[in-house]
Structure formats: C-alpha cells, structure tokens
Amino acid sequence: MSQTLLLLPGDGIGPEVIGEVRRVAAALTPDLTLDERDFGGISYDRHGAPITEEAIATALASDAVLMGAVGGPKWAGAPRDKRPEMGLLGLRKAMDVYANLRPALCFDALADASSLKRELVAGLDIMFVRELTGGVYFGQPRFIETLPDGQRRGIDTQVYTTSEIERVSRVAFELARGRRNKVHSLEKSNVMETGLLWREVVTDLHRRDYADVQLEHMLADNAAMQLVRQPTQFDVLLTDNLFGDVLSDEAAQLTGSLGMLPSAALGAAGKPGLYEPIHGSAPDIAGQGVANPLAAILSFEMALRWSLGRAAEADRLFAAVEAALAAGARTRDIGGALSTAEMGEAVLRAL
Ligand code: IPM
Ligand code: MG
C-alpha cells in the first residue's frame, strides 16, 4: 500500500520551503503520495478556522504530516481561539504527538555562522526532547479576569501527571541509547511542584528501565547558561513544554541558523508524526524566494526516518544536504546569496 505524506504549507515562507520539499520528494521518493491542506492564517481566511476538522481527520489518516510555518501580522487581530498558533496547538493535541525531537546540529561548513566561537560549537550534536501536549500550554484553568478592585489578573496552570512525564522520558532514554547514552533532565524542582514530580518520575523510570543510560538532573536556568558556556557537554536534553520551547530556540541559535533546523513530534508507535522546521513564517522575507529551505528538507528527512520507515532514503538526503553545504551552497541567512529554489537545486544535484 502506498504511503501518504500530508503537506501543510501554511503561511509566510511556509509554501516556499515546502515547494522545495515537493521537488526533493519527487526525485527521492516518487512512490510517496503527497496530499495538501490549508493550515494557519490561510485556513482562517478561507475556512474560518486555523485548521478544519477535515484537515485534522486527513492528518490522522496519513502516514506523516509535514508543515511549513504558520502565522503572521495579518492575523494578529484574529479572535484568540482562531489564531494560527491555536491551530498548531490543536493539531499537536489531536495527533497526540507528545514527544518533540529538536536536534541542534552544527554542520561543520557553518560553524563560523554561529554567534559563539567556532571552538565552542564545532561538532555540536544535541537533541532536545520537549514534552509537547501538556504543561502550561494546555493546563486548566487559564483565563484573564477582572478583580473587584478593578485590577486584571491572568492565570495559567502548569500541570503534569506521572504518565505524561514517563512516556516522554522513555523517548529520551531510548534515543540516548542510540547516541552518546547521556540524558540531562531539566526542570525547576527547586521552586515548582511539577518540577519536583518531574525529577521523581524521571529518577524512578531511570532506576527501573534505563539504569545503563547516564542521567543528570539540571535546573533549567542553569541549563540555559551551560548551553552557551559549553554546549557540547550535552547529548539528549529532556524537558517540559515551556522550558523546551525557550531552550530549544537558544540551542538553535548555537548552530548558526534557525533556517537549518528540523523537528519531529512523535506519538505512540504506528501513529503519524508531525514534522516541522523550527523557524517561523518569517513575514519579513515571505514572497521573496530567499528563505532557506533546508530546515523543511531536513524535516522531510526526519519524516522518512521516523514515520515512513525509509532510513536509506533519509541517509541519502542527509548526505546530500551536507554535500550541498560543503560545496558552498548558502542562502542569505547563512551568509550566501542563493534563492530558495537554487538551494533546492543544490540539494537535488547532490542527490
Ligand atoms: C514552537 C513555537 C510554537 C510553540 C508556537 C508557534 C505556538 O514557538 O514550535 O516552538 O510555542 O510551541
Ligand atoms: Mg518556540
């Protein structure tokens, strides 16, 4: 039976970078069926919601889902529950993709593009495992209220259960075994109850099932500092939804360009994964054909590897991206002048 990849190009530079994925897929995996739906602001404009029920059902029935980017100033005034970002959170929740893998890899050819010195980032290869469907992003209650004295008060709730912590921690430990066998678990157990529970559950799971993996607990603020002091000390970093959001942006910048980094959000085995470049919709350069398509192309690479069972094609694609970079292919964000399409062509040539 043929496999289906659902493309959600979205807004801003999303359609431009996903266009290059289409070309790569046509060359590398011609038997893969590509489907497509509106997502984000464009879906709101056309259908009145950032993602339709039909698109969610299509996503759940696909083998993998690859999105471009969502959002932009045009929708800043949209009703809060109709904002593009809410479509993304809703899709993550509906797909139950609780483990977000965010690699921060420094390609040797780009080590000088980092804002840190080359000797600090050369060879950097770390993997964030961010919990993606719980925590303060989804916790109830959440609201803004007006108090009797006229002040307003905003409330969010950070909440985690044992099973939510355990299932994402398993992903981190399993991944570490295939890498350098080291997990840093990040929380604020010194001030937060959820942080304390997080530390206890991770410790317990480690003792029961993963004693062969090296585990260190680190406070999230210290981790933020260690990431710019000596990032190569890390292998796998396990953390909750909010700390993972913040710290993975920091880690991304270490590698030289946000335009380079892919991500994978995974749920239970056999369920479709959700793949996305970690960059946003970049409204400032949208429509100019200058966005770097490599994060989207590498997200496709992760989909081949983690959802579609095509490791050989994934290896070929990864090698092609490395070869294109080594041959000097650079878009503007990494110090060159290639257009989006020209970077796509450089990868196709290397393939
Ligand atoms: C990310 C983004 C999203 C998040 C936004 C767009 C909702 O920042 O994927 O890191 O906060 O998760
Ligand atoms: Mg983020």
Image (cartoon, helix red, strand yellow):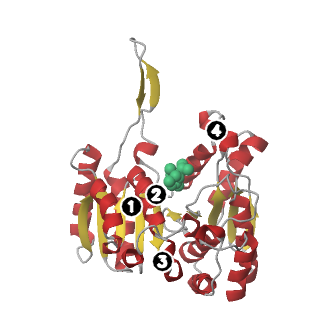
Element assignment for label 2: loop
Mark nearest the camera among 4 and 3 is 3
Badge 4: how crowded within 10 Å, few (<14), some, or many (20+)?
Answer: few
195 vs 206, nearest the viewer:
195
Element assignment for label 1: helix
The residue drawn where x is 64% and y is 64% is 66
Question: Where 169 falls versus 57 (above or below)?
Answer: below
Work out whether mark 1 precedes mark 2 in sequence or the reverse, and give the earlier one: 2
Question: Where 107 falls versus 58 (above or below)?
Answer: below
Three-letter code, disc 1: Val
> How far is the residue under mark 4 from the one under mark 2?
27 Å
Give the numbered dot on residue 98: 2
Left or right position of 49 against 196: right
Work out whether mark 1 precedes mark 4 in sequence or the reverse, and give the earlier one: 4
Three-letter code, disc 4: Ala
Mark nearest the camera among 3 and 1 is 3
| Circle 4 residue | 76
Element assignment for label 3: helix
Given contact means CB atoms under 8 Å apart, are the residues at marks 3 and 1 in contact?
no
Given contact means CB atoms under 8 Å apart, are the residues at marks 1 and 4 in contact?
no
Given contact means CB atoms under 8 Å apart, are the residues at marks 1 and 2 in contact?
yes
Badge 3: how crowded within 10 Å, few (<14), some, or many (20+)?
Answer: many
The residue drawn where x is 41% and y is 18% is 151
| Circle 1 residue | 168
133 vs 272, nearest the viewer:
133
